[in-house]
Image (cartoon, grey):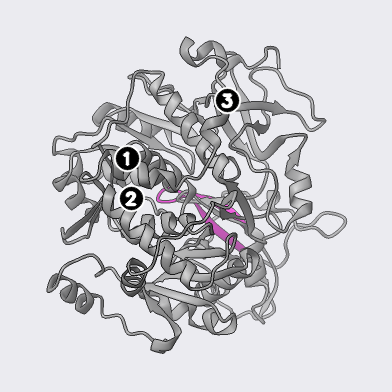
Amino acid sequence: MTAVNPWQKSYPESIRNYQVPAAVMQGSVAQFSAVGAAQYPDSNAFSMVLANGLQQSLTFKQVDDLSTAFAAFLVAQGLQRGDVVAIQLPTSLHYPIAVMGAWKAGLIITNMNPLYTAREVALQIEDSNAKLLIASDLFANTVKPVVEQQSLALVLCSMADFFPEPIAAAIRQHLGVKLELDASQYQTFSDALSAGAQLPPAQREAHPIALYQHTGGTTGRSKGAPLTHANLLAVLEMAQVHVNAYDVKIEPGEFILTALPLYHIFAFNFNFLLFFKLGACNVLVPNPRPLNNLKPAFAQFKIGWMTGVDTLYAGLLAEPWFTEKPLHLKYVVSGGTALRPSTAMQWQQRICPILEGYGLTETSCFVSLNPPLGQVRLGYVGLPLPACEVRIVAEDGQDLPFGEAGELAVRGPHVINEYLNQPEESQASLRNGWFFTGDMAVMDENGFLQIVDRKKDIVLVSGFNVYPNEVEGVIALHPDVIEVAVIGRPDDNSGEAVCAYICSRNANLTAAEIIDYCRKQLTGYKVPKYIEFREQLPKSPVGKILRAQLRDPQPASQQQ
C-alpha cells in the first residue's frame, strides 16, 4: 500500500487515530440491560408486530426484570458458568430475554436458524457442546430427535407468549401447533420466567466468551466463531463513534425495524445490541415474508432506521403501499450481500440515504460502513470503522497499491482470535494478528473499500452463506448420484441461487427428485434452485472438480 491507513484522512478530525478505551471493553454486554432499566425504565425496548397487526411491547425495565428471572431459572437447571445455551428462535420478544438472561447467568449462547433440519441442529449442538436449547414450539417437532439423542434440556416458546388472554388463545388456535414431544421433555418459556421470578437473582461473573456464532467453512463443516464480550463491547463502541462523528445520533426512543432474523450477526449486533444500548426501540417482525407483513409495523411506528439485504430493499421498492405513503426513515443500512447499483440509486432517489457496509461473523459483524452523509458513494462498502485496520494483500503476502484487487485482511479489537474446535482453520485464516477474510477487495487512495469478488466459493443467497461442499455432501449421498458440483448463479430475487451439476447412474433421475431429497436435509435457502445433469464434470489432472469451468451462462432446469 502506498500510504499507511489512508482512510484516516477521510475521517472527521474527531475520530482520526481513534482507539477503543480499555475501560469500554470491561464487563459484559448484559450490563446494557440494567443501564437501560435505570435510564429508560418505562420506554419500550422491543415491540413485536404480527402480520395481522397485533402487537406487544416490553419496556427496558421489563426486559431487565424478565432476563434476571430467566438467569435464575437457568442457574437452577444446574448450568455452570461457561456452559452453552442454544437459541433457535424467530425474531420475537423472547430473544432479548433469553440472551440477556444467559449472559447474566455466566453462560455462552449459540444462535441457530429456526428452520434448520434435525441434522443441522445436531451438528451445531455437538460443535458448541450446548446443554440447553431454547426453541420455538413451531419447529419443536424437528428438534425432537436431537433432544432425545443428546439428552438436551429444552425450553419452548410460543408466539402467544406476552399477549393477554383471550388474544393469546386466538393466536394459539391460529397457529395450531401439535407437539409430538411428551410434556416431560420440555419446559415452557412462560413457566421458566415464573419459576425464575421466585428464585434469588443469579450472582455470577460473565464468562469472557459471549457467543459461539456459527458461520460456514470451505470444507462444508460449520465453523464456530467465539465472540467475546470484549469483542462486542468494542465493535458497538466503534460503530457508535463512527456514526456520531458525522453528527448523526441514534436517539433514545427512536425506532429501528428488525425484519432480518436476530440469529444473523448483522441484526444481532446492529439492531439488537447497538440500539438497545442507546435506548432506542426495536420493532420486531417475526416473519417478513411476504413483504406485506411489514405494512403494520410501518403503519404503527415512526420507523427511522432499518437494516436489510439488497433483495429486501428491492422488494420494498416494488410495493405500492411502501412507496406511496410518507415515511419517517432517516437512514437504512445494507449488508450481508452486495447492494446492486439499481437498488441503491432508486432507494436514494425515492426514500432516504442507504448506507452499504461490510463485515463478517469473525469481525463481530462490522469492518466498514459508508459515512452517513446525504450523498453516499454507491458501489463502495465505505471506510473501515475507527480502530479497525485493513490491508489488501497479494498471494505472496505483500500489500497491494491502491486500485489493485487482493485479499482483504482485517485487524482490530473486534476480531476473533480463533475458531471453535478447528485449529487448522484458525491457522489458515488468522495470521500474525490479522484475519484473512477470503474476500477480494480494492481500496482507493481515500481508504474507501469495494468488494469485487470472493476468493472462496461461497454462494450468497439473500445474504446467507451457502457452502457448496455441504450441499454437495448431501446430494452425493443420493444412491443415483455419481458426482456433483455446486456453484452460485446470479438470481434477480435472491442475489445468487444454488445450482447443482450432477452425474447420475439413473437416466430417469429428475431435478424434482433431487430438490425434494435436499429439502429433507437442508434449510430452504441451501436447497438448489437449479439442477443440471451432465455426462461428466470438468476435472483437473489430479481429479479435482473444477467449479470455475461450470460458471457459464448455459441454461439449467429450474426448481418447480
Q: Position of residue 412 (x, y in %)?
A: 62, 31
- Numbered mark located on residue 387 in the image: 3
The picture places residue 82, in percent across and down from the top left corner, at: 60, 59
Up-down relation of residue 44 to residue 500 (above or below): above
The numbered disc on residue 259 is 2
- Which residue shows up at 15% across the image and 58% down it? 53
Nearer-the-camera pick, 399 or 13: 13
Asked if marks 1 and 2 touch (Cβ < 8 Å), the reply is yes
Mark with earlier residue (1, 2): 2
Q: Which mark is residue 306?
A: 1
Residue visible at 79% across and 57% down in the picture: 539
The answer to which image quadrant residue 389 occupies is top right
Q: Which residues are magenta?
A: 486-500
498 part of magenta stretch: yes
| First-in-chain label (3 vs 1) | 1
Could you tell me what secondary structure mostly forms the magenta stretch? strand
Name the amino acid, label 2: Ala
